[in-house]
Amino acid sequence: MFEQLIWYLKGYVRIRVTGYSPERFLNACRYKNIYIWDLKRVCGSYEMNLTIDGFRRLKEIVRKTGTKVCIIRRSGLPFLLHRYRKRHILLSGFLICAGLILFMTRFIWGIDISGNLSYTDDTLKRFLSSENVKDGMKKSDVNCRKIVQDLRKKYDRIIWVSASVDGCRLVIRIKENEDDFTDSSKISSDNNEEGKDIIADTDCTIVDIITRTGTPMVQRGIKVKKGAILVSGQIPICNDEKEITGYRLKNADADITGEKAITYQKELTRQYIQKKYYRSRFYFLQKRNYGIRLGRHYFTTESKNNQYPVFEKHVVQKKYQIANVIPVTLEKSTITPYRKMYKKYTKADARMILSADFQDYCKELEKKGVEIIQNDVKIYTGSETYYAKGTLKIRCSVGRKMPSVPIPIENSSEEETKNGD
């Protein structure tokens, strides 16, 4: 592979040798130390590759051996440059591209963050952006020491930070205090032992309750208000005389189902706007524009002065990275102009649209585990609108957890002493 690269840079030719005795030609080349490779016999003649310098030394060998030499193919960089020597645009384009690449390498085109556990990459990058550390900034403006100080000052869990510039990327390595995670896990487990109650998150009627942990405070058929305790996380501890001497704190756990009525209302105006697209004889009138985004810079062929008052714009983006460093986004936008035409819905159309919206609403409730047991929604006609209005009786899961409120323990012996006095 390395030899092929050298041959390409120096340039080489492929020749065909014909005549009475081509073997004498090969022996003479060996005697003159002319390097030959890829030798093949083709129809009584020989084809081979040799360098430009070796080809120039063949004149005396050809004269002595009585052979004929013809060039089949010229390959290599010297022939390529000679072929395009008069194409100045190609040369200037190559120089501009090389200069652009050299210019782009002066900027930061990516921020790599590793070692973060509790803080996401987006969180850290937003903070760095607020400190003017972002993609597209100059390498000369990067102050690694300040970045390290700002991160350690902003986030308490970070105990070690290193920042360095690697090529066109800013590399940030972070180490967090792992003791905080172990302590937080212990605290969370301790908090679970502090006890939690299940309270009602809405007004409803309890239709079913299955308690796994805790003390149930309601029964089936009871109406409860929002905030009422449904299952207590405090389990009473009694002595031999059936007196409550304390409470054991638990994390209440139960499946509670309740019934309630909810209101549904959806309006639809009689008048609506229909889009009338401009079109020629065979196709709709459209205008396509192209753009390219390099970092924070954007270049587009779209004109700022659009002659159409209203239009649709569809944009397709494709993101690339040059050498996995420089982000480049190619955009293709299609502008489709149209006219606004005002029309009115008929009763049948309005009923169909409102019914479809209501069916979608019911499907969303079913996805959330809500059961509809009664439907009183009807469609009405107003002066300027059509609307669907009514109530739904639903059955759904009820309850959310809250920290348990300690219950004071009554001291029966003190009460007896006071009564005795």
Image: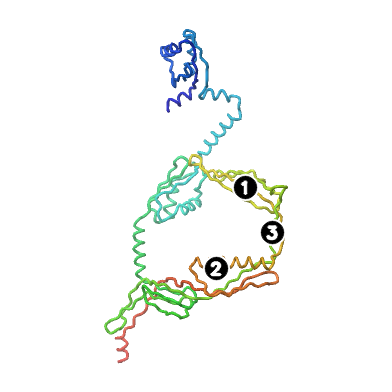
Q: Nearer the viewer, residue 48 or 290?
A: 48
Q: Residue furthest top?
A: 64
Q: Earlier in the sequence, mark 1 or mark 2?
A: 1
Left-right relation of 115 to 43 = left
Question: Where 161 sits versus 233, above or below?
Answer: above
In the picture, the disc for residue 333 is 1
Nearest to viewer (mark 3 / mark 2): 2
Percent coordinates x, y for residue 326 in the rendering: 51, 42
Q: Earlier in the sequence, mark 3 or mark 2?
A: 3
Percent coordinates x, y for residue 105 in the rendering: 50, 38
Q: How is this picture coloured?
A: rainbow
Find disc 3 in the rendering and name its residue. Answer: 274
For label 2, the crowd category at 10 Å Cα-Cα, with few meaning under 14, some 14 to 19 and many 20 or more, is some
In the picture, the disc for residue 190 is none
Question: Residue 21, located in which quarter of the rendered image?
Answer: top left
Q: Residue furthest left?
A: 240
Question: Residue 164, located in which quarter of the rendered image?
Answer: top left
Q: Are marks 1 and 2 in contact (CB under 8 Å)?
A: no
The C terminus - image quarter: bottom left
Percent coordinates x, y for residue 212 in the rendering: 37, 73
Q: Nearer the viewer, residue 80 or 408?
A: 80
Find disc 2 in the rendering and name its residue. Answer: 362
The amino acid at mark 1 is Ser
Percent coordinates x, y for residue 223 in the rendering: 47, 80
Left-right relation of 267 to 65 = right
The residue positioned 49% from the left and 53% from the top of the image is: 126
Question: Label 3, label 2: how many angstroms apart (C-alpha)?
Answer: 28 Å
For label 3, the crowd category at 10 Å Cα-Cα, with few meaning under 14, some 14 to 19 and many 20 or more, is few
